[in-house]
């Protein structure tokens, strides 16, 4: 991370007329075909708890750090969050999630993510993203920092982060940092475990490999939880500390966030178990 002032040309927030769909986000209401398909075809019942944490306040942008989960477990939460923004009257906000760059190696995916999911494909650096958040040209964005670690299975549900750039951009732009945890799509995953319940040493508890293969059975229940997070770092730290100091502090911040997300996941598991029990009772009673 560079030391010194923010990106040149970044000033006070202001309303910016912006033509979406050009590789720097889309208006969230344009994601309706995506979330309608996911929530109608892939999930029977889906719910988002504490969704108000996602709504911008005082003109501040929102940066969402979500748990990835194995394979495609992240897909329903993106649909839930997008629908929540539209239902809350925020459909005109410019937003877009940022996937692992390897996704764009699949032919056609880059264009799909850019046009449909709002991926800011033209944003190349943390400095650039910070500037766009500060000026309001991107108002909602997020990622799942586990990245390729989602292919691996760890002792904790939220695996080690491979990227801290989105966390840095959130702090540097004074954005509302929101954590999001979810459960319910694990039935799409096949986990190849190490024998005898072993885990590899010095790997954050690596226990196996996740495989997400079709066909994808319609999920009975899916539960997500959003929660505001106050980082220990501030925008000022990036201006007065050295690059090395910022990097070390970001390491600590990332681990704090990961720990909080694993605790959130425990809560979501309890909620999901309750919904599934309720569903079984209703089925048994012929409701």
Image (cartoon, grey):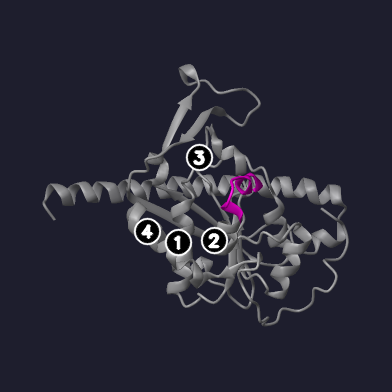
Q: Quadrant of the C terminus?
A: bottom left
Residue on which the image places disc 1:
34
Foreground of the two, 81 or 285:
81
Residue 107 in the magenta stretch? The answer is yes
Residue on which the image places disc 2:
117
| C-alpha separation, residue under disc 3 versus residue under disc 2 | 25 Å
Horizontal relation, residue 110 to residue 13: left or right: left
| C-alpha separation, residue under disc 2 versus residue under disc 4 | 15 Å
Horizontal relation, residue 190 to residue 166: left or right: left
Q: Identify the residue at the far left of this view.
A: 286
Q: How many dots with numbers?
A: 4
Marking on residue 39 = 4
Task: Please state which of the two labelled residues, at mark 1 or mark 4, is closer to the viewer.
Answer: 1
Whichever of labels 3 and 4 marks the residue nearer the N terminus, that label is 4
Query: Badge 1, how many Cα within 10 Å: few under 14, some, many 20+?
Result: some
Query: Dot 4: what SS?
Result: helix
Magenta portion: prevailing SS class: helix
Q: Are marks 2 and 4 in contact (CB under 8 Å)?
A: no
Q: Are marks 1 and 2 in contact (CB under 8 Å)?
A: yes
- Look at the picture and state if 87 lies above or below 210: below
Query: Dot 3: what SS?
Result: loop
| C-alpha separation, residue under disc 1 versus residue under disc 3 | 26 Å
């Amino acid at each position: 991370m560079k030391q010194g002032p923010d990106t040149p040309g970044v000033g006070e927030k202001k309303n910016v007329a912006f033509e979406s769909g050009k590789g720097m986000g889309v208006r969230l209401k344009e994601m309706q075909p995506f979330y309608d398909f996911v929530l109608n075809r892939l999930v029977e019942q889906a719910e988002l708890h504490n969704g108000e944490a996602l709504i911008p306040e005082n003109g501040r942008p929102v940066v969402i750090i979500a748990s990835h989960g194995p394979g495609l477990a992240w897909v329903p939460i993106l649909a839930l969050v997008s629908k929540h923004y539209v239902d809350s009257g925020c459909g005109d906000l410019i937003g877009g999630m940022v996937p692992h760059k390897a996704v764009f190696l699949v032919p056609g995916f880059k264009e799909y993510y850019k046009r449909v999911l709002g991926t800011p494909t033209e944003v190349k650096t943390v400095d650039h993203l910070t500037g766009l958040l500060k000026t309001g040209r991107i108002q909602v964005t997020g990622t799942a920092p586990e990245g390729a670690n989602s292919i691996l299975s760890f002792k904790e549900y939220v695996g080690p982060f491979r990227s801290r750039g989105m966390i840095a951009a959130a702090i540097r732009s004074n954005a509302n940092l929101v954590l999001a945890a979810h459960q319910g799509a694990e039935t799409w995953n096949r986990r190849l475990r190490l024998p005898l319940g072993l885990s590899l040493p010095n790997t954050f508890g690596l226990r196996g490999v996740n495989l997400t293969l079709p066909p994808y059975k319609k999920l009975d229940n899916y539960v997500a939880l959003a929660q505001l997070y106050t980082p220990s770092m501030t925008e000022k730290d990036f201006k007065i500390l050295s690059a090395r100091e910022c990097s070390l502090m970001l390491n600590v911040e990332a681990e704090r966030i990961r720990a909080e997300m694993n605790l959130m996941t425990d809560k979501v598991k309890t909620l999901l178990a309750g919904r599934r029990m309720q569903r079984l009772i209703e089925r048994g009673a012929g409701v």
